[in-house]
Image: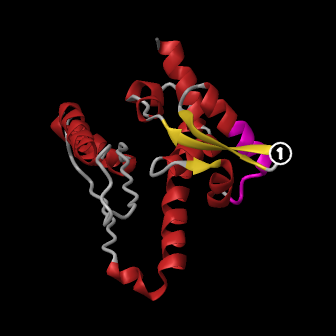
Amino acid sequence: MAAMSNERARLLLHPVRMRVVIALSGEDLTTRQIGEILEDVPQASLYRAIAQLHEAEIIEVVDEVRRGGAIERTYRMVPANAVMAPNALMSGTPEELLGAAQTFADVIVDTTARHLSVAGEQWREDRVGMRHEALWITAAEREELAADIQAVFAKYLNRERSPQAKLWAVMVAIMRDQTASRLDHEDAAAES
């Protein structure tokens, strides 16, 4: 089981494959549409990433349409296979984790830039939020926080899409903040 988790983590921690999965998290897309979203990715790299994700059953084909002499496939993310458990995420190397964090940050910037370019001056009408909190919590409380966040996502995932619904990107990261490690050491020294 650990080998499978490691293999899935390696697939999902790759920047191009991660971006494909994120692009498919909101809607079904054709390869062409994915390419338009990931316009900086060379076509060969994109096709290879899609093939690898499909082979691993992280994405699936939901439609095929013949266009000229080619078949255009529409893909959908398989949510149960696209989520990494924390132990799978931790199975990568430090470099892979850092790359995943960079890709995640890039997706936030790209999503914001795309919204601003499409919304024009009306961007203020959408309630955009960003928040960073430094929380002093125990390992048990961190697990409770993760469960609470999963419950919030579960409440809104897989709902019937209403005609008034708009696609929103909700991105959460929980990371140990080492900027306070100096304070941790000072506190420990003061207690002894």
- Toward the viewer: 28 or 147? 28
Where is residue 154 shown, x and y percent of the image? 26, 41
**Which region shows up in magenta?**
39-49
Quadrant in the rendering for residue 69: top right
Residue sitting at 48 percent across and 14 percent down? 2
Query: In this image, 72 relative to 157: left or right?
Result: right
* 37 on left or right of 160: right
Q: What residue is rendered at 31% in x and 45% in y?
A: 157
Q: At label 1, which amino acid type do we have?
A: Gly
Residue 183 on image: x %, y %: 28, 48
Residue 99 seen by the camera = no
Where residue 52 sits in the image (x, y, percent)?
66, 31
Magenta part, dominant SS: helix
Q: Position of residue 91 (x, y in %)?
A: 50, 24
Query: Where is mark 1, residue-wise?
Result: 69
Q: Is residue 50 above or below residue 123?
A: above
Tell me if I can see residue 51 in this picture: yes
Q: Quadrant of residue 47?
A: top right
